[in-house]
């Protein structure tokens, strides 16, 4: 997946994840898998692509906080 940032003529910045895009006479169309349209922009000021950061799942024996920080397990035993 790729993250697309699209600024529309009214000054709103849209951030959308999609697989691919097409820019033709109909405007800009962002597509998900299987050819489904994620968004259609008939008019826009600019568009840029950025890579989507892969989320890493915590490894076994660790926990994660709301901020995404990984915390090691608490010590147990005597």
Image (spheres, grey):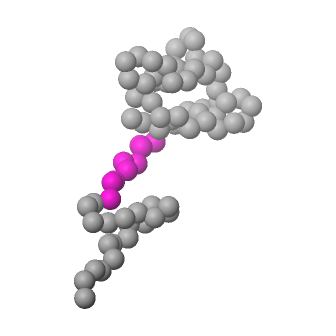
Above or below, 66 relative to 5: below
Query: From the image, which quarter does the N terminus lie in?
Result: top left
Task: State which region is magenta.
Answer: 50-58
Q: Residue furthest front?
A: 78
Q: Residue at x 33, y 54 (%)?
A: 57
Above or below, 57 relative to 43: below
Name which quarter of the figure residue 36 lies in.
top left
> Was residue 56 drawn as part of the magenta stretch in this picture?
yes
Tag count in the figure?
0
What's the magenta bit mostly, secondary-structure-wise? loop
Which residue occupies the foreground of this view, 14 or 73? 73
Q: Residue at x 71, y 29 (%)?
A: 9
Q: Residue furthest top?
A: 25
Asked if residue 5 can be seen in this view, the reply is: yes
Q: Residue furthest right?
A: 10
Above or below, 17 relative to 39: below
Image spot of residue 60 (x, y percent): 26, 61
Name which quarter of the figure residue 27 lies in.
top right
Query: From the image, which quarter does the C terminus lie in?
Result: bottom left
Above or below, 53 relative to 41: below
- In the picture, measured across the screen, residue 8 lies left or right of residue 39, that is right
Which residue occupies the foreground of this view, 18 or 66? 66
Image spot of residue 69 (x, y percent): 43, 66
> Was residue 31 drawn as part of the magenta stretch in this picture?
no
Q: Residue at x 25, y 83 (%)?
A: 77
Which residue occupies the foreground of this view, 1 or 5? 1
Asked if residue 49 can be seen in this view, the reply is: no
Image spot of residue 75 (x, y percent): 30, 80
């Amino acid at each position: 997946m790729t993250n697309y940032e699209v600024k529309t003529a009214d000054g709103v910045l849209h951030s959308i994840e999609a697989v691919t895009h097409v820019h033709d006479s109909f405007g800009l169309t962002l597509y998900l898998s299987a050819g489904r349209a994620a968004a259609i922009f008939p008019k826009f000021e600019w568009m840029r692509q950025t890579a989507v950061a892969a989320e890493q799942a915590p490894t076994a024996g660790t926990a994660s906080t709301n901020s995404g920080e990984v915390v090691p397990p608490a010590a147990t035993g005597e």
